[in-house]
Image (cartoon, helix red, strand yellow):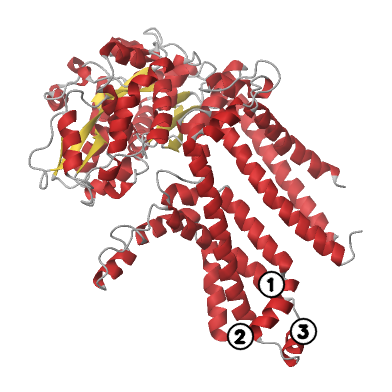
């Protein structure tokens, strides 16, 4: 039953990935011959494999700057998304009512707005003569920083895109906790924060891990938001990858960056798998 | 369980439909070839800015289809050339395997690459009689395997109400930028030709004439060390650029100029003249060419992949593009320079070029040198 999907994934995803990784190691024959014939500055392996492409990219200060920018933007975006999603989901679960419903409805709106339009709106809102600076100017603050075209704007954009998923995931997780458990903990004398810490959070580790890992993998590889809203340099690896492939005609270097992002994302994926296995083990489903 | 079956069934149905559509289109191709006297469609891939798309959809394609009944042109447009590399790979793979790449005519930067890499059909006057009217110097950068159909150059645009004495040379321009911080910008060279031309012009200042010619005519990566001084100068301008960020694309720079957020910028002559005509740029914006060195210019080329189909119709389209009447349309619709010698156009069009001679455009680097220049700029400047 499992074989056909595995076959499709192996043929259409697995094989090209293996061919691309082989290209980054300097093998320019076979499926890579077309790309290799048009590429510039490639490192060809005379026999076996060569790590010259990796050495070139990991020794380049621009690439390292982009890598650092990608990592810190991802970490900050994940933390802010988790904080916002938890706050909104908790408010919805514990307080309920009209305001909570309005808040959760608003937080899901970004799902329905195309990312390109949202990015343009963001960059106009935070530009030199945008809404934020104009309001600050009229309130007397004449040198409010311009957030547009900086990595801060990229963080804001990524948070905007990922909060809806976080709120949906966490509110469904929190709704799965029966009222009786919360009431029991309150009856035992626990404060609200203690209840959240000892009852609600441990039961929602999996949704939290899902939100964190999915947001992290999305931001790691994102292109649209950093391209439209980010600075000229340093920017996220998604934009660099695209530049190396199209504008600089260096597909081998571009694929090296892709492998680096893949390794980072695989690490995050491993965290996700570990969390799920641990939860299943505790529930007695896995030996 | 039922849901699984439904999902499987839906997926299978979609797969069958997709396969059927693909088979259907190839069947239609076969039928079209069989009924050669009926409609013949050629696929044209165009990569560039929106003004190029407008030229095709509003002028070239309707005019050709009217004068050649039974021949249709299908346009595939790629903005800013985002699909160029993948399309180039696709065409290259198809030509090497002697299969049809799905594209019969290519317009954009990748036409030059196809021509230089031997993937395009050489142009001869036997195939395209109007080729005889084209200035021969335009055919050298593409080794005669691509057809120039218009020309353009980069010029300096400035706000005449704010800039009383625009700089006339490159040195004066650099001096102006440094004394007027935040009033000048150029787009990153990998997203638009006007910024790319500015970068190339600054680099050319420090390159000897002999090395410059080598860089224009071929790929000489060992000479790239000549660029160091130019890149240092560009890096020193970082703090004087508007907002400290380099916009993406030619149009973004024109928008900043139109909104009055900057006072001066390098722009494409054809794009800015069209914008002035359509009142997208205020009439207070004037254009001029600097000297020593001047900004670059050159031809825009179309190329025919070696395994294109319906080549007779493709050559007819290319011949159509070079007719004096159509060249006049190109000049008017896009404010571009004609590819054919001026003497073939009528007097009213000739008068437009009395002050600027399209025959003396300073040529730009070869394609591979330009991609290396883009990469170096991204590393050294921002």
Question: Residue at label 3?
Answer: A181
Residue B154 x %, y %: 25, 30
How many residues crowd around disc 3 within 10 Å: few (fewer than 14), some, or many (20 or more)? few
Question: Residue at label 2?
Answer: A95
Chain bearing tag 3 is: A
The image's mark for residue A172 is 1
Q: CA distance from mark 1 to mark 3?
A: 16 Å
Image height check: is B90 above or below A11?
above
Residue B196 x %, y %: 33, 31
Viewport quadrant of the N terminus of chain B: bottom right
Quarter occupied by residue B354 = top left
Q: CA distance from mark 1 to mark 2?
A: 15 Å
Query: Residue at the location (31% across, 19% down)?
Result: B322
Indicate left or right for A261 with B173 as reference: right
Indicate left or right for B209 with A153 as reference: left
Mark 1 vs mark 2, foreground winner is 2
Query: Residue at the location (59% across, 16% down)?
Result: B96
Indicate left or right for B299 with B352 as reference: right
């Amino acid at each position: 039953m499992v074989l056909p999907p595995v076959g499709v994934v192996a043929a259409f995803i697995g094989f090209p990935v293996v061919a691309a990784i082989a290209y980054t190691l300097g093998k320019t024959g076979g499926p890579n011959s077309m790309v290799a014939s048009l590429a510039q500055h490639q490192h060809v392996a005379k026999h076996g494999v060569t790590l010259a492409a990796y050495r070139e990219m990991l020794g380049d200060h621009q690439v390292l700057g982009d890598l650092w920018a990608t990592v810190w933007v991802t970490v900050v975006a994940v933390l802010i998304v988790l904080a916002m999603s938890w706050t909104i989901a908790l408010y919805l679960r514990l307080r309920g009512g009209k305001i909570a419903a309005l808040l959760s409805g608003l937080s899901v709106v970004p799902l329905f707005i195309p990312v390109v339009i949202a990015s343009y709106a963001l960059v106009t809102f935070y530009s030199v003569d945008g809404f934020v600076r104009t309001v600050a100017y009229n309130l007397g603050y004449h040198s409010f920083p311009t957030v547009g075209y900086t990595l801060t704007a990229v963080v804001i954009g990524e948070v905007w895109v990922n909060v809806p998923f976080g709120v949906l995931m966490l509110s469904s997780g929190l709704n799965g906790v029966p009222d009786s458990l919360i009431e029991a903990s309150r009856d035992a004398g626990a404060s609200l924060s203690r209840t959240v810490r000892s009852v609600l959070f441990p039961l929602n580790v999996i949704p939290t891990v899902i939100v964190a890992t999915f947001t992290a993998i999305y931001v790691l590889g994102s292109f649209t938001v950093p391209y439209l809203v980010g600075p000229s340099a340093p920017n996220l690896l998604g934009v660099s990858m695209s530049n190396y492939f199209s504008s600089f005609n260096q597909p081998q270097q571009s694929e090296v960056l892709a492998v680096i992002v893949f390794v980072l994302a695989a690490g995050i994926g491993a965290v996700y798998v570990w969390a799920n296995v641990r939860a299943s083990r505790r529930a007695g489903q896995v030996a | 369980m039922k849901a699984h079956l439904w999902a499987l069934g839906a997926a299978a149905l979609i797969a069958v439909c997709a396969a059927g559509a693909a088979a259907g289109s190839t069947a239609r191709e076969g039928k079209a070839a069989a009924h050669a006297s009926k409609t013949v469609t050629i696929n044209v891939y165009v990569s560039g800015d929106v003004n190029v798309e407008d030229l095709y959809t509003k002028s070239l394609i309707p005019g050709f289809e009217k004068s050649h009944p039974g021949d249709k042109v299908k346009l595939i447009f790629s903005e800013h050339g985002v699909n160029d590399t993948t399309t180039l790979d696709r065409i290259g793979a198809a030509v090497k395997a002697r299969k049809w790449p799905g594209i019969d005519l290519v317009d954009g930067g990748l036409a030059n690459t196809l021509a230089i890499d031997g993937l395009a059909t050489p142009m001869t006057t036997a195939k395209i009689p109007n080729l005889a009217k084209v200035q021969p110097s335009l055919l050298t950068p593409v080794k005669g395997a691509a057809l120039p159909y218009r020309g353009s150059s980069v010029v300096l645009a400035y706000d005449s109400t704010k800039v009383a004495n625009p700089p006339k040379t490159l040195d004066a321009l650099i001096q102006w930028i440094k004394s007027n911080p935040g009033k000048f910008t150029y787009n990153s060279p990998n997203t638009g030709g006007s910024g790319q031309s500015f970068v190339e012009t600054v680099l050319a200042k420090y390159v000897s004439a002999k090395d410059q010619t080598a860089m224009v005519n071929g790929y000489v990566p060992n000479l790239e060390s000549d660029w160091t001084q130019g890149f240092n100068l560009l890096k020193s301008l970082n703090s004087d650029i508007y907002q400290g960020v380099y916009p993406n694309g030619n149009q973004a720079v024109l928008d900043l100029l139109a909104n009055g957020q900057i006072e001066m910028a390098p722009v494409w002559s054809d794009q800015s003249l069209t914008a002035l005509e359509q009142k997208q740029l205020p009439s207070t914006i004037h254009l001029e060419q600097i000297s020593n060195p001047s900004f670059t210019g050159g031809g825009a080329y179309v190329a025919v992949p070696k395994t294109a189909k319906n080549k007779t119709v493709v050559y007819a389209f290319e011949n159509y593009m070079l007719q004096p009447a159509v060249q006049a349309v190109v000049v008017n619709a896009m404010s571009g320079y004609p590819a054919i010698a001026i003497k073939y156009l009528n007097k009213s069009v000739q008068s437009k070029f009395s002050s600027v001679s399209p025959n003396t455009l300073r040529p730009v680097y070869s394609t591979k040198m330009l991609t290396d220049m883009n990469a170096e700029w991204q590393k050294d400047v921002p």
